[in-house]
Amino acid sequence: ALERTLSIIKPDAVAKNVIGAIYHRFETAGFRIVAAKMMHLSTEQAEGFYAEHKERPFFRALVDFMTSGPIMVQVLEGENAVKRHRDIMGATNPADALAGTLRADYAVSIDENAVHGSDALESAAREIAYFFTEEELCSRTR
Ligand code: CMP
């Protein structure tokens, strides 16, 4: 089915100047970018986005990292977008990521892992709504 998923290019990848390279991967994989913005998250915004991880030992480091510099946030649209986006990102830990995936190519550690993607259709809807209004989604399905 035609789906939308939330993608974040994290501060490490923005600092490496690979926004365009990553967008090229999205486009050659057949996704359409239907919304995008650069943001520098506040602590409150990062904590809210990652609220489900609040009790995890890595939560504070995650929030510190995600607020350390600008990020690119985008909505990708395409067939089976949630799963296909996760496939091109590769495993959360770049040490486990398959060759040719974004994390294998751009991530250095599980903490600084270059990209984020929604893990399910329900979280995609929640994460998209966290950053974008319905009017900001320039989808051809509306
Ligand atoms: P992300 O997909 O953005 O979701 C939560 C992030 O926490 C994850 O990517 C990792 O960058 C980071 N993280 C750090 N340690 C872990 C861990 N042990 N398990 C899962 N995520 C982790």
Image (cartoon, rainbow, N blue to C red):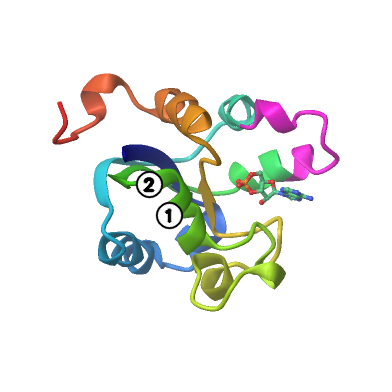
- Residue 44 shown in magenta: no
Tell me the residue at 71%/59% (across/down).
110
Badge 2 is on which residue? Answer: 81
Q: Are marks 2 and 1 in contact (CB under 8 Å)?
A: yes
Pick out the residue farthest to the right. Answer: 57
Q: Secondary structure at mark 2?
A: helix
Picture residue at 38% right of the left edge, 47% below the top: 81
Quarter of the figure with the N terminus: top left
Q: Nearer the viewer, residue 108 or 99?
A: 99
- Residue 59, image x and y in percent? 76, 38
Relative horizontal placement of residue 58, taking residue 8 as reference (left or right): right
**Residue behind mark 1:** 84
Residue toward you, 122 or 135: 122
Look at label 2 and name its amino acid: Ala
- Side of 61 where 19 appears, left or right: left
Q: Is residue 55 magenta?
A: yes
Q: Is mark 1 within 8 Å of ligand 1?
A: no
Provide the residue span drawn in magenta. Answer: 50-61
